[in-house]
Amino acid sequence: MQNETRVNLKHLLEDLRDVYASPIAEVIVTELIANALDSGASRVSLEAHPSERFFRCVDNGNGMNRLALRGYHNIAASTKERGEGIGFAGVGAKLSLLVAQKVVTESRGKHGAQGAAEWYLKNAYRAPWKFIPFSGLIENGKGTAVTIHLSEEASSLLDVSFLAKTVQRHYYPLLTRNEAIGKILKTVYKKPVEITVNELPVRVEQLASSKSFFVHIGKNRRAIGAGFIEKTKMDEGFWSRLFGHEATRSSDTGLRISTYGKVIRGGWEWLGISVTHPELLSGVVEVPGLSEILTTNKSDFLTTQGALKKYYEIRKAIQRAVLPVLREFGEVEEKAQDRKTPSAFKPLTYDIEGALSLMSETFPELESLVGEHWRRMKAIEGKGKKKKERRKKISFLGGVGDESGRESEEVNQEKGDRHELRVAPDGDRTKRERHPGIEITFEPFMEAGEHALLGKLVDEKIIINTAHPAWKRIQVLAQEPYHVLLTVALILGEHLQSPRGVNVFVSEFLKAWSEASEKSGRLL
């Protein structure tokens, strides 16, 4: 009996293929591995057979019975729920139809249940499949084998070197054997995962100069992730750049972020931290909890309100974990990181804070960007009339109207949310310096690729790029505050990735700022 998928499968598969940034052969490999890992596999074997023109992926996961294998041939079928894995509906095998003469899937599940099926794309509208005899590729226990009989002899899937590099690039955390990452991945995989290419284990070597770190979050400092950063020697990078040879290092530059061992994003831009020599630094940080906010195809993160909040909370935690390592390597300028907001811009900063407060209901995801300061803002505003009544009791000199002239403990605690205690030189009195809920600092970005940025957000600080040509021109015109205002709006709007768009956010921000500045009575 022959069954048939009655959808325009080719059109759907081409649309799905176009969602990925990688070439289709790379997507097929990574997705086959992802689905194997989601099925509980601890061993994934990739095989390239150029002479016979087929590629095979075999795993020791939970496998499928005939009923599950039937549903497996439905392009929309998936029993997975968000946050439970990194694969998507068997898309590796399904995308294979675009490059294969036929795809053969054999699987053995629980209690010895087994099945095998052959599938191919006949034309744009027909993708027939049928059950075939089980050949015994899964000899013992459970598992699944997907064999792709390729249409072209020159397919990358028949290149052993391509397969090994693809595994290294996309599953770096599973291969490093880093102790810190291993502790985190134990919460996901009970056994260490081994991936082989033509029976040879795929490995990556970690440099001796690497530094590990854990990512903590919350009041109890719970570890939610781990990673490491490594730095190469200057001469290695120099010769590689000079002669154009591929670096012999086991990783590309930049910090990769992964979940369940699968790399989702790389580089330094996503982290929002400038480093002195980005081409010499590389590493990875694994955070399993990010699997809950992966897109449908598991190749990026969602941009919904709740997902963005979670992503930026975790990003801040990663920033806090990474900065000490970068300082130890001498890759961040301490002065640049600690630079304070010039006093001339503090009134503007307070009005920006007021604008964000007015936008809190319309854009609640702002809390994910300026979380700690945002919570302080809300706490202070929530005190309302009671706060105003207490202020009436405070004398002109700042003390509560008691005989000692000292402020009450309650008022001190309230003001401590937004003030720093300063001891006067004579030691007799104290004063408090007000700090805004959001910090704006100024520094030049000299790294390649960053000179065109107006600014960026780093750990609740908005840094204005003073090396940008617009900043230099604005200084001539003496209109710096307006430049800062627009830069802040653009940075926050871009990071929020709101479905309403950056333009809507900028418009609402400028409207809220005008209301806040008019109310405060401050002028630019």
Image (cartoon, rainbow, N blue to C red):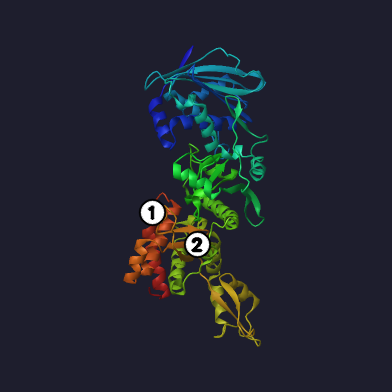
User: Can you name the residue that lies furthest to the bottom here?
Assistant: 403
Where residue 200 sits, quadrant-wise, is top right
Q: Which residue, given by chain and number where applicable, does mark 2 sit on? A: 461
Which of the image's four quarters has the C terminus?
Answer: bottom left
Mark 2: which secondary structure?
strand
Measuring from the top left, give residue 155's x and y in whole percent.
44, 25
Measuring from the top left, give residue 356's x and y in whole percent.
45, 63
Q: Looking at this view, is 419 or 31 the one in front?
A: 31
Disc marking residue 342: none
The earlier-in-sequence mark between 2 and 1 is 2
171 lies left or right of 465: right
Measuring from the top left, give residue 364's x and y in whole percent.
48, 56
How many marks do you count on the picture?
Answer: 2
Q: Looking at this view, is 405 or 281 the one in front?
A: 281
Measuring from the top left, give residue 175's x and y in whole percent.
60, 37
Q: Which amino acid does label 2 sit on?
A: Lys
Q: Which amino acid does label 1 sit on?
A: Val
170 lies left or right of 423: left
Q: Which residue, given by chain and number where applicable, does mark 1 sit on? A: 502
Spatial CA span between label 2 and label 1: 19 Å
